[in-house]
Amino acid sequence: MSSKLKDVRTGIFILILSVFIRFISNNILDSKVSELGPDFMPKIISIAMMIASVILIANGLFSHRKLKSLNNTEEQAESEEENKEELSGVSEKVNFKNVLLTMGLLFLYISLINIVGFIIMTILFIVLQIMIYSEDKKAGILRNVLIGVIVTLVIFIIFNYGFKIMIPLGIFS
Amino acid sequence: MLFSGFLAIFSLTTLSLILVGVILGIIFGSIPGLTTAMAIVLCLPMTFGMEPISGMALLIGIYIGGFSGGLISAILLKIPGTPASIATTFDGHPMAQNGKAGKALGLGIVFSFLGGLISILILIFVSPVLADFALQFGPYEYFALAFFALTMIASVAGKSLTKGLISGFIGMLLAMIGSAPIDGYPRLTFGLHYLDAGFELVPAIIGLFAVSELFKIAEHYIKPADNKVQEYKIKGFGFSIKEFREQTVNFFRSSIMGTGIGVLPGIGGALASLMAYLAAKNSSKHPEKFGTGINEGVVASESANNAAIGGALIPLLTLGIPGDTVTALLLGALTIHGITPGPLLFQTNGSLVYAIFAALIIANIFMVIVEFFGMRVFVKLLKIPKILLMPVIITICVVGAYSLNGRIFDIVTILIFGLIGYVMERNDLPLSPAILGFILGPITELNLRRGLMYSNGNFLVFFTKPISGVLLVVSILFVFYTFFKHIRETSKAA
């Protein structure tokens, strides 16, 4: 997708979001304390965001069409985009599977840290996250486990005993 | 007087307390999530048994170290260690990526020192005048200042003005989730009580800057060929006398802005460094180079945030008004020792005040020395492959976020803001305007509504008060200027 079409997509998403926020701002209870109630700012900002998103969509469509009629075809725009990507060194496709895995792992880490405890969850998180990042999943497992254990213990000792900061211990408490 | 102040702290115990404070402050400042306030809380009980001068020496060491420590992670990892170092990431990190990590750190450290020094001198010599100035700031002036700063979003917008504005609005809306100012009505919480208190700034920054990076690295496997170690050279502070001289104007402007903004209670270092950065960018002959890793950016941000220290101490010592959590804790420490800051402090406890001034200067000098030698160790971080470093940093961030209030919700916040930051970056929406909106939105709203309460709903008062009137007119002119410049540029491009 050309960058201009991407803008249109972003714009539509923001437009929907701002209409939604403008809509739910109606449910904010109005207080009588001051002239402007708590609903004033959310309403103003969501309307401003609506306007900005419409400009983004219009700009995107307009320059996309101009590109098309000016040069040539979509392909040119597309290849330009690819050139740009190559220049910045990111030519391969985005690995969304790994991004989602990372998000899922962080979610698990955060939701279980209080139940299972900091030490076990942190070791697991570090080892698994390095694994997600590595192309060869099995390489250096021993090294990763070692990093996980040492880092976790060092953080735990420094924070818990040095800085006297409470750390969730989970099943060890 | 100052000389006798130096004599008062010139004992081995006091000097080593300052040194310990500075080191502890740098550690807490450089780790995202750990705050200067936390380090002070940790050490406060220890100071109870000490002489007032020794106790304050330790706390002042932490204060100075904490403010400056944030630059280390901001430059090397693009994760601001404290809100005050957000603007340091803009040019500091690109410099590190271009192999100039040593220079970026060196500039940051030296100008932190100089910025701090200038503001301490201002504190010593002109604090009564500035305290009067701060007293004139009511809701009208605060609103005008925050509004003025908001119009600056256009300058950090990057390539597209529209996208920058959208980012700014997103930041403002995120800050609105929770209880509304003044009346405390819950809004945009979807009935979830976790959200009633809203999101805190520190976990929000960790999420936007650190967690989003965790997701971004997962996008591509890093090939061994790409994983080359960023080269860096460090000699002395890494920059030449000529480069130092080039920064003179920028340095003075940023330090004075930093001190001025620091004086205003409740505004603080984050805004000081952002505003100084934007001022440097707007007055530069080559504004387009900002953000690519140039000296000016680091110098502006770091001189200003350390200059905010001296600024924040002015209302604290002369009026007894703390501007943020850290100065509130310092106020507490003073009161515990039976000292009441305020207009009479200079008469009743003059010797202690000058001892505090001397401790500030010494702490500032220790900060440079510690960071100068530490710099060579810090840059080694760059040698660690990102796929190993990033998971470790995230666990430290998680502990840091948790320790802020000891609640899981703050860790959930870093996940939420990480997702938001990642989605925004994928859609080319820049993150810095969002953070600016997040910080300024609540200040703007609170003071707008408070001001209208004072004036019985008359908005004109905002324009008739001299300070706020000037600020508002300048902001409106600035908006028009940016708008027309933008139109001219786009029509030229077409």
Image (cartoon, grey):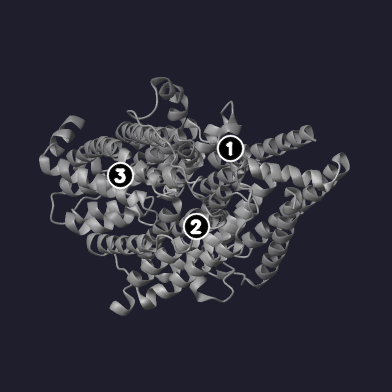
Q: For the point 43% across and 50% down, which residue is it? A: B385
Image coords of residue A157 (percent x, y): 25, 63
In which quarter of the view is residue B71 placed?
A: top left
**Marks 1 and 3 share the same chain:** yes
Q: Amino acid at mark 2?
A: Leu
At mark 1, the secondary structure is helix
Relative placement, left or right, of B136 versus A169 is: right
Do labels 1 and 2 touch, CB within 8 Å? no
> Gap in Å between the C-alphas at discs 1 and 3?
36 Å
Q: Amino acid at mark 1?
A: Val
- Mark yes or no: residue A151 visible: yes
User: Is A171 placed above or below B175 here?
Assistant: below
Label 2 sits on residue:
B214
Relative placement, left or right, of B221 versus B394 is: right
> Gap in Å between the C-alphas at discs 1 and 2?
44 Å
Q: Mark 3, residues whose alpha carbon is within 10 Å: few (<14), some, or many (≥20)? A: many
Label 3 sits on residue:
B65
Label 1 sits on residue:
B470
Mark nearer the viewer, 1 or 2: 2
Q: In the image, which disc is placed on residue A55?
A: none
Say which label, 2 or 3, has the lower sequence index.
Answer: 3
Say which label, 1 or 2, has the lower sequence index.
Answer: 2
Q: Quadrant of the C terminus of chain A?
A: bottom left
